[in-house]
Image (cartoon, grey):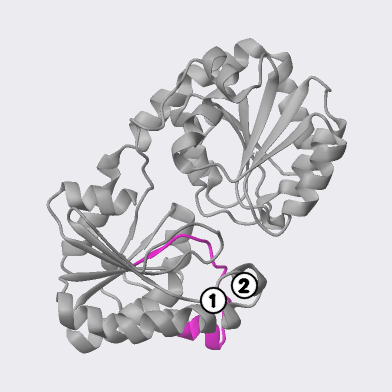
Amino acid sequence: NDLVEALVRRKNEVFVLAYRPLTTKVDWKVYERRKGSEILRIPWIPGIFYNLVESPVLEFLYLFPGLFLLLPFIIIIKDPDVIHAHGLVAGFVGVCWGRLFGKRVVISTHNIYHFPDTGAYRNFVKWIFGKSDFVMGLSKQETGELSSLGIQKTRLGTFTYWIDLNKFKPISKIEAKKRVGWGEKFVSLFVGRLVSEKGIRPVLQAAESWNKNIHLAVVGFGPLEAEVKRISSNNKNVVFLGKIPNENLPVYYSAADILIIPSTHEEGFGRVILESLACGTPVIGSKRGAIPEAMDESVGQLIDVNVKNIRGAAEYFYKNPDRLMKLSKNARKFAEEKYSAANVEQIIRAYTKET
């Protein structure tokens, strides 16, 4: 939505081809027209995506057919100037049809893939990126990984997420805590998919042993939801909030004293970090992946994720409110300087840059 809105504000016409929501139970429309944009959502089998993430081949076969079958018709009908494909599956589809129709193809990656040094998979992704006109990684680490595939520097760049700073902005912490019913509690907040690689388990384990005046609020959904519910029912200091609509998240970020991002895998960038900082809430973040690019210790603390370190960081901030207040004051300014909508220009340049 942020990219579409930013492009529309700059007088671009945007057509989005995507699948229906595959991991969440929400209302959706096959076709939707908005000012300056159109969205076509492909009806598809929902509820099995998380079962396939451990098998790249099955995940590819699941996501490939719908995009591949519909994209040529969209190109013929809409005659786009550029195809912007997000991720490997869409990138492959975009390259196949974009080359055939003579369209500029830009691919952006949103994850760190850990491509093997040799083999068919590496050759396959090299072909995909090699046939595109421009490739963008979401972090310097991603861009470095792409560069290792031999992509020319003139066709490679880095882009940075941005957020709506008018939407994600600080609310008085006293008022925010009152609105969500947290009173004067010290609350650590987790926002993310409830899967093991997001680090929800070590956070829950830390919450069982940290200072009893520290509370944990969990926002999210996913395969480990039942486990989170079970623990929250047995521990009064853990509350499971489920899925919170995006428009309601700012009050929860503002009400929290600290956000915890305990990813145990190579996190791409961590959008919730940006949202939390914009709301003035510091972050305890994993040192994995691109998280150290998204934040620094002027706005939080970076840790090697394990139960001891999560517990220690949360207790440190609980016991040092002055330090927490200083980081909170830094957080909003940090977000304004690094994550404004001006970052869309990085993508627009990729749409038009000669190779």
Give the mark toward the camera: 2 or 1. Answer: 1
Amino acid marked by disc 2:
Ile
- The amino acid type, in three-letter code, at marker 1 is Ile
User: Which residue is nearer to you in this view: 16 or 30?
Assistant: 30
Residue 188 x %, y %: 67, 29
Q: Residues within 10 Å of mark 1 (few under 14, many from 20)?
A: few
Which residue is nearer to you in this view: 74 or 267? 74
Question: Considering the numbered disc 2 on the image, is that residue within a helix, a strand or a loop?
Answer: loop
Count of numbered circles in the view: 2
Q: Dividing the image into 4 quarters, which one contains the C terminus?
A: bottom left
Residue drawn 65% across and 12% down? 321
Q: What's the magenta region?
A: 107-124
For this view, does 311 lie left or right of residue 143? Answer: right
* Residue 255 point in image, percent of width and height: 57, 23
Relative to 164, is 59 on the left or the right?
right
Question: Regarding mark 1 in the picture, which secondary structure is present there?
Answer: loop
Q: Are marks 2 and 1 in contact (CB under 8 Å)?
A: yes
Residue 69 position by quadrant: bottom left
Residue 187's x, y, as percent? 68, 25
Q: Residues within 10 Å of mark 2 (few under 14, many from 20)?
A: few
Q: Position of residue 260 (x, y in %)?
A: 64, 36
Residue 307 visible in the shown view = no
Q: Which mark is residue 48?
A: 2
Residue at the top extreme, as displayed: 322
Identify whether 301 is placed above or below 243: above
Q: Is residue 108 magenta?
A: yes
Q: Is residue 144 visible?
A: yes
Disc 1: which residue: 45
70, above or below 210, in the image: below
Q: Relative to 153, is 328 on the left or the right?
A: right
Residue 7 in magenta stretch: no
**Residue at (45, 82) in percent of width and height:** 64
